[in-house]
Structure formats: structure tokens, C-alpha cells
Image (cartoon, helix red, strand yellow):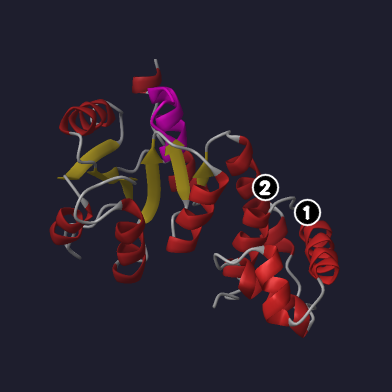
């Protein structure tokens, strides 16, 4: 039944690229996608380098599924390169691993979605459909739920009323520095940075550093 349902309501063809170094997984996913009513895999690649070589302006997918752990050019590097070269392609990362830190790194590189390889095929179909319609999809893991919420609510309600200190703090949020290191670099007491963080949590309706990172990047506040 799922296979007969179109991925989007308008039934337009969705062109997909898949990059994964595990041939069996890649070929199985591509074969399954090709059975969906209005989806077609137009490019397969064993790593990011090959994917970049195979995408041209004449042969451009609507969406790319990109494995994170690949030789030569991993998922993070691939997503970053594709975001710069082909900004119209929607980029979804896939991996067996799932952590807030990883999702945060993916968003920093330009990914708009993430699906765990342990999810079933119906979840993947739902994810691709939501990516095409809404522009993003994050699976239901606690860390990614929050990111989705931040992208739905907090980022849309951003006002240009941030203080200089808050803007500097948000820039630091997108680095690898700990809160303690951020406090030191900003010349603040740790308690002051906690106050800044909690105020921003409340303002943008998020509850973790990843949520603040999404907001910072949407505002262009990265170092």
C-alpha cells in the first residue's frame, strides 16, 4: 500500500541521489525508492567525491541521501560541498548513529534532514516526502525532535532585538567551545553565560545547545 502512494500530492517526479559506500545497502534502498510511484534514483555513488563528480546542472537531483561514514569524502564534507555548489538540492544525512552532537554538526554543514538507518522503509518514505514538501525532516529521536521544533517555531519567531552580548554568545554556541571556555573568551563569569543561555532558551522556545545553534545559523551568527 505504501508503495502505491505518491510521495507528494502533486505527483511530480522526485529525482534522488544516493551516496553510500555499502553496496548492498545502497542498491537495496535505490531499488525500493524506484518502486515508489513518483520517485526515481538518478545517481548512485560510493562516496561524496563520486557524488559531486556525477551531479551536474543538467543532471541535478531534488534530494540527496548521504551516508555520514564514507571513505575519501565523508558525509559532513559532502553536505558542505553540495550546499555551496548546488544550494537547491535538499540534503538528508543517513547513519546508524544518532546523537545531538552529530545532528548539530550536520546542521552546521547544511543538512536539512536526518534519518537513522535502523528506521524502517516507511519512515524513509515519510522523511523524503516531508523533505520535499516542508524542506526538512528529523527522525523522532529526542535530540532531533528538538531541532525540528526549533526550525518550526523558534527560527520563525526571531526578532532583531538581540543584544550585542547575546549575538556574540550565539556565535560561540556554533563552535566546539565548552560553556566554560565561552565564558572565559567573553570575559564573563560562568553564571553570566548560564543566564544568557537560559534567557535565549526561553525566548526561542528551545531547550538545548543544538536548538540555539540552529537559531544562530538561521540568523547568520556563526564564527
Residue 168 appears in view: no
Q: Quadrant of the C terminus?
A: bottom right
Tell me, for residue 62, which label it has, or none: none
Spot occupied by residue 117 in the image (x, y as percentages of width and height): 38, 31
Q: Quadrant of residue 110?
A: bottom left
Give the magenta part as a residue range. Answer: 116-128
| Circle 2 SS class | helix
Mark 1 or mark 2: whose residue is earlier in sequence: 2
Q: Residue at x 20, y 40 (%)?
A: 21
Q: Name the foreground residue: 135 vs 93.
A: 93
**Residue 121 is covered by the magenta coloring:** yes
Spot occupied by residue 151 in the image (x, y as percentages of width and height): 62, 54
Q: Residue at x 61, y 42 (%)?
A: 143
Q: Is residue 123 above or below residue 216?
A: above
Q: Name the foreground residue: 184 vs 200.
A: 184
Q: Residue at x 71, y 54 (%)?
A: 153
Q: Is residue 216 left or right of residue 93?
A: right
Contact flag, marks 1 and 2 (Cβ < 8 Å): yes
Q: Which residue is mark 2?
A: 149
| Circle 1 SS class | loop
**Residue 207 is covered by the magenta coloring:** no
Q: Quadrant of residue 188?
A: bottom right
Q: Quadrant of residue 77?
A: bottom left
Distance between the alpha carbons at the discs numbered 1 and 2: 8 Å
Graded by Cα atoms within 10 Å as few (under 14), some (14 to 19) or many (20 or more), the crowding at tag 1 reads some
Spot occupied by residue 154 in the image (x, y as percentages of width and height): 72, 58
Q: Is residue 143 left or right of residue 17?
A: right
Q: Which residue is mark 1?
A: 205
Spot occupied by residue 103 in the image (x, y as percentages of width and height): 51, 49
Q: Is residue 198 left or right of residue 38?
A: right
Q: Quadrant of the N terminus?
A: top left
Amino acid at each position: 500500500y505504501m508503495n502505491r502512494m505518491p510521495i507528494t500530492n502533486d505527483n511530480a517526479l522526485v529525482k534522488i541521489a544516493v551516496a553510500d559506500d555499502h553496496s548492498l545497502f545502497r542498491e537495496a534502498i535505490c531499488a525500493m525508492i524506484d518502486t515508489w510511484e513518483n520517485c526515481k534514483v538518478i545517481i548512485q555513488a560510493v562516496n561524496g567525491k563520486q557524488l559531486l563528480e556525477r551531479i551536474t546542472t543538467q543532471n541535478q537531483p531534488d534530494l540527496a541521501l548521504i551516508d555520514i561514514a564514507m571513505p575519501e569524502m565523508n558525509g559532513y564534507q559532502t553536505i558542505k560541498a553540495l550546499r555551496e555548489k548546488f544550494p537547491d538540492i535538499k540534503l538528508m544525512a543517513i547513519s546508524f548513529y544518532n546523537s545531538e552532537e552529530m545532528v548539530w554538526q550536520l546542521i552546521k554543514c547544511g543538512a536539512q534532514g536526518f534519518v537513522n538507518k535502523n528506521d524502517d522503509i516507511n519512515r524513509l518514505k515519510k522523511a523524503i516526502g516531508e523533505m520535499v514538501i516542508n524542506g526538512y525532516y528529523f527522525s523522532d529521536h529526542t535530540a532531533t525532535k528538538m531541532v525540528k521544533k526549533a526550525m518550526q517555531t523558534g527560527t520563525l519567531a526571531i526578532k532583531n532585538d538581540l543584544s550585542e552580548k547575546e549575538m556574540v554568545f550565539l556565535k560561540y554556541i556554533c563552535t566546539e567551545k565548552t560553556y566554560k571556555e565561552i565564558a572565559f573568551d567573553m570575559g564573563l563569569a560562568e553564571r553570566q553565560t548560564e543566564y544568557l543561555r537560559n534567557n535565549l532558551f526561553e525566548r526561542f522556545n528551545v531547550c538545548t545547545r543544538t536548538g540555539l545553534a540552529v537559531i544562530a545559523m538561521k540568523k547568520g551568527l556563526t564564527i
